[in-house]
Structure formats: C-alpha cells, structure tokens
Amino acid sequence: MIKEYIIKIFSTIKFNRYLLIVLIFTVWIGFFDSKSFLNLFKVRSEITNLERLKEEYTKKIKEDKQKIKELKTNKKNLEKFAREQYLMKRKNEDIYIITTKGE
C-alpha cells in the first residue's frame, strides 16, 4: 500500500515538470536560502537571548541608579563606599588587606 503510494508520487513528479520545479523551489527556499527556516530559528533564539540580557541590564541599571542616589544623599554611605571599593583611608590610619589563596 505505502510502496504503491510512493511510486505514484514519484511517477507524478516525474511527469509533472511544474510540480517538480515547485518542490525544488520550496526545498531551496526552506533550507538553503539566506532567509531559510534554519536561519529563522537561529535569529529567533538570538533575539530571545538578547531580550533576556536587556532585562538583566535594565535591572542592573536600576540598582546602580539607586546606589548612586544613596551615595549622593548620605555622606556615611559615600565614605563606606570609598573605603570598601577604592581602599581610601583617613590620615594616620593603616589598611591591611587579607586575602585567601583562592582570591
């Protein structure tokens, strides 16, 4: 049954040039063209990844803006930030940095 159906399809394609041309065109556009299905899936996955990164970066920007606002309004936070991030110190003060082997 299936074998007869396959033979019938091939015989139809063999005698119908237009069907053969449409089939070749469809395969070419679907898989080998620059706008093929494979490229479409690659682009969509890249868009999804970029949208995820965009959300992460906008979240990080909001956090950084909040930190900047806190640093501009509170002097104690500014001093704490300067000491921790840039290892700044007061006069007559020594800073000792202790690190472990893994750092």
Image (spheres, rainbow, N blue to C red):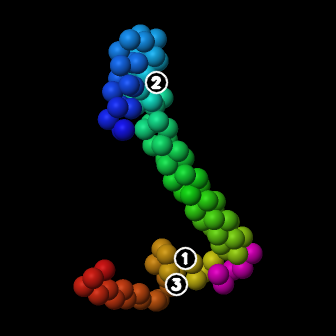
Q: Residue at x 32, y 86 (%)?
A: 99
Which span is picked out in magenta?
73-77
Residue under numbered circle 3: 90
Query: On screen, 67 above or below 102?
Result: above
Residue under numbered circle 1: 82
Q: Residue at x 49, y 47 (%)?
A: 46
Q: Pick whichever of labels 1 and 2 is earlier in the sequence.
A: 2
Where is residue 84 shown, x and y percent of the image? 50, 81
Q: Is residue 50 visible?
A: no
Amino acid beneath label 3: Arg
Q: Pick whichever of labels 1 and 3 is earlier in the sequence.
A: 1
Tag of residue 32: none
User: In the current view of this chain or complex, which residue is farthest to the right?
Assistant: 73
- Helix, strand or loop under label 1: helix
User: Comparing marks 1 and 2, which lies closer to the viewer?
Assistant: 2
Q: Is residue 52 visible?
A: yes
Query: On screen, 4 above or below 93?
Result: above
Query: On screen, 89 above or below 7?
Result: below
Residue under numbered circle 2: 26
User: Comparing marks 2 and 3, which lies closer to the viewer?
Assistant: 2
**Mainly helix, strand or loop, the magenta region?**
helix
Q: Pick whichever of labels 2 and 3 is earlier in the sequence.
A: 2
Where is residue 19 shown, x and y percent of the image? 46, 16
Amino acid beneath label 1: Ala
